[in-house]
Amino acid sequence: MRAKLQATAILIACIASHATPVRAHHSIAGAYDTRREVTIEGVVTEFHFVNPHPTLSVRAGSNVWLLEMDNRSELSRAGMAEDSFLVGDRVVVAGNPSRSEAQRLYIRRLDRPSDGFVYEQVGTRPRITRAGR
């Protein structure tokens, strides 16, 4: 009986050590009010192309907004890079406001009129287009 318990314990330990880790991910609807949309126009003050979600800081009037994007790996595949936004870029952004923080949005669409750059969230995937393409 004892040998059977030891074998079972070893088997469970082996399975557990080889299990694929599950990554936790927050729900956009949990953090942002997906029933509301806010539009701001302003100037980029910072761009952080980081995991898990890149962020932009945008000065709109006297307020600085923190804007969250889709995950970095999907944005990279869509064509975004660390130099996609520069300080001083003028942008128009539509997104869902944070449920708990003022001046924070999840970006649904971002337009940079100077060169026709458009980033938008289409379903669950990001899409990037440029004027003339």
Image (cartoon, rainbow, N blue to C red):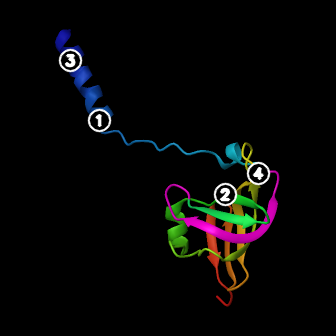
Above or below — where is 88 with respect to 49? below
Mark nearer the N terminus (4 vs 1): 1
- Residue tagged 4: 34
Residues at marks 2 and 4, CA–CA distance in whole angstroms? 17 Å
Mark nearer the N terminus (4 vs 3): 3
Which label lies toward us, 4 or 3?
Answer: 4
Count numbered badges in the picture.
4
Which label lies toward us, 3 or 1?
Answer: 1
Image quadrant of residue 17? Answer: top left
Residue 17 — which label?
A: 1
Which label lies toward us, 2 or 4?
Answer: 2
Furthest-front residue in this view = 62
Mark nearer the N terminus (3 vs 1): 3
What's drawn in magenta, residue-wise? 35-53
Which label lies toward us, 4 or 1?
Answer: 4
Secondary structure found at label 2:
strand
Residues at marks 4 and 3, CA–CA distance in whole angstroms? 52 Å
Quadrant where the N terminus is found in the figure: top left
Residue at 52% of width from left, 65% of height from top?
49
Which amino acid, by three-letter code, is at mark 1? Ser
- Residue tagged 2: 66
Which amino acid, by three-letter code, is at mark 4? Thr
- Give x and y (percent) for residue 12: 29, 26
Residues at marks 4 and 1, CA–CA distance in whole angstroms? 39 Å
